[in-house]
């Protein structure tokens, strides 16, 4: 087979297979920002490739637990998105605003592992915004509990 035929064969049969593999990964987080020309759609695999952050804390819904995920700061730095106030939305359309100051002061993470297990929808997943409650006792309030949005699937950065 000539070199040109091999090249054409690979374009027709091999390259589309790699796109099919990526297309099968479910988008679990979409980020909208005026800094982006289009919505950023991320899969579990995309998030899992980023530097991990861990928080060990009690929550009103769990005993002391280990949470692992990506910090909002690392996520935004990786994709070169300027940090600003944001609106977070869950799968059930629950919406909460998280100010930039929270990210600067408390470094919450977008957790996708809880006690070493990948989180499922029925167990607060696939993504849960977790604050280090035990490290900052001022966070033990309904105001901050309401920001710990589970089943997170969308972030809109506010202008």
Image (cartoon, rainbow, N blue to C red):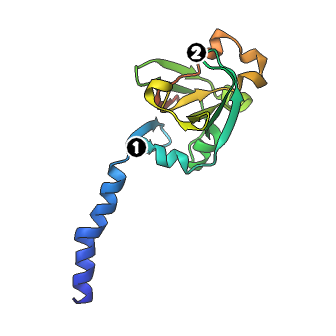
Q: Measured from the top left, where is residue 71 in percent x and y?
A: 63, 38
Left or right, residue 130 beside residue 38:
right
Q: Measured from the top left, where is residue 7 in percent x and y?
A: 27, 79
Of circles 1 and 2, the one toward us is 2
Circle 2 residue:
146
Instruction: Name the element at disc 1.
Output: loop
Instruction: Name the element at disc 2.
Output: loop
- Is 5 rendered above or below residue 45? below
Residue sticking out furthest to the bottom: 2
- Is 47 rendered above or below residue 127? below
| Number of numbered discs on residues | 2
Quarter of the image for residue 102 reads top right
In what quadrant of the picture does the N terminus appear? bottom left
Q: Which residue is at a point 71% across and 30% down the rendered structure image?
A: 56
First along the sequence among labels 1 and 2: 1
Left or right, residue 158 beside residue 3:
right
Q: Which residue is at a point 51% across and 24% down the rendered structure image?
A: 150
Viewer-proximal residue among 136 and 116: 116
Circle 1 Cα neighbour tier, 10 Å, few/some/many (<14 / 14–19 / ≥20): few
Left or right, residue 34 beside residue 58:
left
Viewer-proximal residue among 44 and 106: 44
Q: Measured from the top left, where is residue 20 in percent x and y?
A: 30, 55
Q: Check whether the beta carbons of the residues at disc 1 and disc 2 lie within 8 A of each other.
A: no
Viewer-proximal residue among 118 and 49: 118
The numbered mark at residue 52 is none
Q: Measured from the top left, where is residue 18 in percent x and y?
A: 34, 61
Quarter of the image for residue 27 reads top left
Q: Which residue is at a point 48% across and 38% down the rendered structure image?
A: 34
Circle 2 Cα neighbour tier, 10 Å, few/some/many (<14 / 14–19 / ≥20): some
Give the Cα distance between marks 1 and 2.
Answer: 29 Å
Circle 1 residue:
38
């Amino acid at each position: 087979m000539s070199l040109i035929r091999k090249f054409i064969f690979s374009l027709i049969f091999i390259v589309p297979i790699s796109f099919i593999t990526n297309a099968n990964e479910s988008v679990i987080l979409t980020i909208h920002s005026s800094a982006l020309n289009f919505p950023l759609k991320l899969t579990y695999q995309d998030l899992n490739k980023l530097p991990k952050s861990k928080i060990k804390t009690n929550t009103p819904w769990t005993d002391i637990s280990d949470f692992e995920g990506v910090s909002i700061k690392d996520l935004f730095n990786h994709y070169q998105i300027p940090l600003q106030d944001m609106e977070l939305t869950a799968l059930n359309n629950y919406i909460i605003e998280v100010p930039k100051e929270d990210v600067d002061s408390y470094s919450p993470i977008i957790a996708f592992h809880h006690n070493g297990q990948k989180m499922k929808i029925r167990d607060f997943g696939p993504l849960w915004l977790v604050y280090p409650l035990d490290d900052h006792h001022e966070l033990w309030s309904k105001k901050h509990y309401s920001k710990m949005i589970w089943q997170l699937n969308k972030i809109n950065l506010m202008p």
